[in-house]
Image (cartoon, helix red, strand yellow):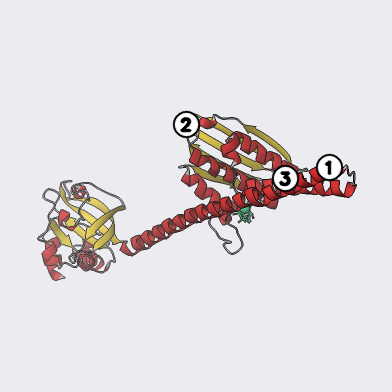
């Protein structure tokens, strides 16, 4: 430790820590320097001074030696760049930085993440004599951040897979419903109609069965279309969007729906269309289930190179922070998460504006 202090003793003009004014008293000349040295050697921040011209290290404190695993003697034979990881700016030591995150390498090769600030040290005449660096070890924090990022990445991948798997299963069930049960119901209805016509039977109960079969057939078609909206391929996105809004307004006769949906759907990639439709479907489902709204407003247009879909309601509203950050993860569903993921899949973003008692607005922006 003394070794490292020798270096600074050679540079008495450094007043790194002017902790006391007492040294102005000629009877107590060493108080400043003693206190200064004590602080430098006990502080939990790595301190280093380099020569402003060559970059050679001319002072290190204990913490810096501990951090990098080199002895003070070894460090005093190095220049600053020797401590940097490959890829870091080798001229960084020349500039003054403030809380800059820098990747260093320790003696044993491990990476050290440091938060570095630097100051130019000048003598009484204003001549630059050294650059003082303070380096705080943030390696643990960085590792935690990296782990968190990885977990978030894994979670997003999982959500994406879940959405794909759900879409695949729904498509299969929709197919079975439409082609299997739906077709058989239609066949049964036709057979019954023919039988009634052939027998000239005006029996109301049989006609009632025909009506019932028609209703079951329509319900099957609706359920099948909700499960997998092949309607988008059949009649296009705008027509599909209008159709789903009609369906919701039929289910909620007390809600007033305003819609302004006009855009050139040829500008939208086919793979994005199903996602947009699903986002609208989930937003409308949420309004129906949770909002108690009187009015719903749906806008969809392309401005410049962005498609913007917004769905707003004047219902009870909610705290988006809690929902989007999964603070009630035991009770909340998957809808919001899946909407967000679908917007991301389309290289876009989803924002939620709401507050308790303030209605809500979901806004999706997708580049076209
Ligand atoms: N339009 C809305 N009005 C009021 N509250 C809403 C609205 N949309 C969402 N919420 C609130 O946000 C929560 C999360 O919505 P989300 O769609 O993620 O889950 P869910 O609808 O409860 O379940 P799931 O979608 O899985 O069936 C809801 O439980 C509800 O409290
Ligand atoms: Mg929902």
Packing grade of label 1 (10 A; few <14, some 14-19, many >=20) is few
The quadrant holding residue 16 is bottom left
Residue at 14% in and 52% down:
55
SS for callout 2: loop
Q: Which mark is residue 305?
A: 2
Q: Which mark is residue 218?
A: 3
Give the alpha-carbon distance from disc 2 to disc 3, as whole Å: 39 Å
Nearer-the-camera pick, 81 or 221? 221
Q: Is residue 103 left or right of residue 295?
A: left
Q: Which numbered disc flags the more N-terminal residue, 3 or 1?
A: 1
SS for callout 3: helix
Mark 3 Cβ inside 8 Å of ligand 1: no
In the rendered view of the protein, which quadrant contains the N terminus? bottom left
Residue that label 1 marks? 198
User: Is residue 222 shown above or below 108?
Assistant: above
Q: Which numbered disc flags the more N-terminal residue, 1 or 2?
A: 1
Would residue 153 be seen by someone viewing this image from the given angle? Answer: yes
Q: Is residue 42 left or right of residue 79?
A: right
Residue at 55% in and 55% down:
169
Q: Are marks 1 and 2 in contact (CB under 8 Å)?
A: no
Residue at 54% in and 36% down:
308
Residue at 66% in and 38% down:
243
**Residue 144 placement (x, y as % from top left):** 37, 63
Give the alpha-carbon distance from disc 3 to disc 1, as whole Å: 25 Å
The quadrant holding residue 360 is top right
- Mark 3 or mark 1: which is in front? 1
**Residue 233 placement (x, y as % from top left):** 56, 38
- Mark 2 or mark 3: which is in front? 3
**Residue 150 placement (x, y as % from top left):** 39, 59
Nearer-the-camera pick, 131 or 16? 131
């Amino acid at each position: 430790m003394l070794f490292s202090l020798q270096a600074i003793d050679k540079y008495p003009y450094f007043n790194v820590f002017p902790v006391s004014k007492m040294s102005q008293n000629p009877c107590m000349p060493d108080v400043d320097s003693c206190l200064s040295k004590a602080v430098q050697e006990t502080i939990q921040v790595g301190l280093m001074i380099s020569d402003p011209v060559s970059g050679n290290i001319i002072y290190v404190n204990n913490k810096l030696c501990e951090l990098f695993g080199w002895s003070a003697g070894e460090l005093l034979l190095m220049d600053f760049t020797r401590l940097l990881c490959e890829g870091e700016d080798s001229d960084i030591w020349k500039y003054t930085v403030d809380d800059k995150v820098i990747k260093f390498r320790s003696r044993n090769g491990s990476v050290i993440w440091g938060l570095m600030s630097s100051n130019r040290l000048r003598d009484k005449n204003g001549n630059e004599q050294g650059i003082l660096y303070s380096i705080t070890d943030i390696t643990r924090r960085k590792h935690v951040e990296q782990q968190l990022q990885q977990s978030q990445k894994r979670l997003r991948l999982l959500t994406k897979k879940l959405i794909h798997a759900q879409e695949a299963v729904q498509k299969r069930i929709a197919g079975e419903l439409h082609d299997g049960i739906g077709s058989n119901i239609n066949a049964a209805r036709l057979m019954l109609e023919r039988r009634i016509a052939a027998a000239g039977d005006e029996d109301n109960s049989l006609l009632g069965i025909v009506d019932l079969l028609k209703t079951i057939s329509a319900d099957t078609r609706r359920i099948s279309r909700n499960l997998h909206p092949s309607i988008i391929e059949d009649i296009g996105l705008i027509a599909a969007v209008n159709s789903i809004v009609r369906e919701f307004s039929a289910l909620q006769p007390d809600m007033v729906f305003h819609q302004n949906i006009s855009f050139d759907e040829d500008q939208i990639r086919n793979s994005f269309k199903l996602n947009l439709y699903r986002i609208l479907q989930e937003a409308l489902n949420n309004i129906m289930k949770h909002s108690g709204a009187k009015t719903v407003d749906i806008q969809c247009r392309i401005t410049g190179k962005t498609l913007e879909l917004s769905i707003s309601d004047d219902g009870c509203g909610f705290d988006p922070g809690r929902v989007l950050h999964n603070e009630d993860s035991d009770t909340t569903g998957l809808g919001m998460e899946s909407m967000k993921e679908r917007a991301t899949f389309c290289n876009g973003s989803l924002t939620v504006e709401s507050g308790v008692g303030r209605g809500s607005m979901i806004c999706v922006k997708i580049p076209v």
